Amino acid sequence: MLELSTVVPREKIKIDGIQYDMLNADEFELKDYLKLQREASQFENLEDKDFTPKKVNELMKAYDVLLEKILLAPKKVRKRLSGTQKIQIIAFFLEARKRAVQNISNSSPDFKDSTGETRKPG
């Protein structure tokens, strides 16, 4: 049985002792989520030589844009975050989505394919 809910749980992030919600990936349209995911991962494979002052500035701007979209915290709170903290929040957002997808595939019932073999979806 497939069980769906339109109520989407949100992850929480505590900054300086105050808890803020982080949007769930399911709250985005698919195209917007894919764009977010692409933006978040565009800097993953950079090498040391790529970290010029210009590239670091672009990276920080990209992280600020992403945080504005996913973290429901006032701008003054987001501005206080260090680059490393921004990376941690974005990674947490992406990992939360991966965990949700894994939970769905782990809880999905087995089914028989056209050959009669039992398989897990996914």
Image (cartoon, grey):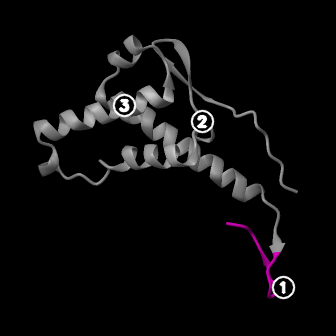
The total of numbered circles placed on residues is 3
Instruction: Label 1, secondary structure: give it.
Output: loop
Task: Tell me what residue is drawn at x 15 percent, y 49 percent.
Answer: 50
Q: Could you tell me how far apart the alpha carbons at marks 3 and 2 are, in whole angstroms? A: 16 Å
Which residue of the protein is positioned furthest toward the right in this rendering? 1
Compared with 103, 82 (above or below) is: above
Span colored in magenta: 112-122
Query: Which quadrant of the view contains residue 36?
Result: top left
Who comes first in sequence, dot 3 or dot 1? Answer: 3
Q: Quadrant of the C terminus?
A: bottom right
Residue position for label 2: 24
Task: Tell me what residue is drawn at x 57 percent, y 50 percent.
Answer: 98
Task: Tell me where residue 5 appears, x and y as whole percent.
Answer: 79, 40
**What's the residue type where badge 1 is placed?**
Gly
**What's the residue type where badge 2 is placed?**
Asn
Residue position for label 3: 65
Compared with 99, 8 (above or below) is: above
Who comes first in sequence, dot 2 or dot 1? Answer: 2
Compared with 34, 77 (above or below) is: above
Is residue 115 found inside the magenta-colored segment of the image? yes
Q: Could you tell me how far apart the alpha carbons at marks 2 and 1 are, in whole angstroms? A: 37 Å
Compared with 53, 50 (above or below) is: below
Q: Quadrant of the N terminus?
A: bottom right
Instruction: Label 2, secondary structure: give it.
Output: loop
Image depth: mark 3 or mark 1 in front: 3
Q: Nearer the viewer, residue 118 or 62?
A: 62
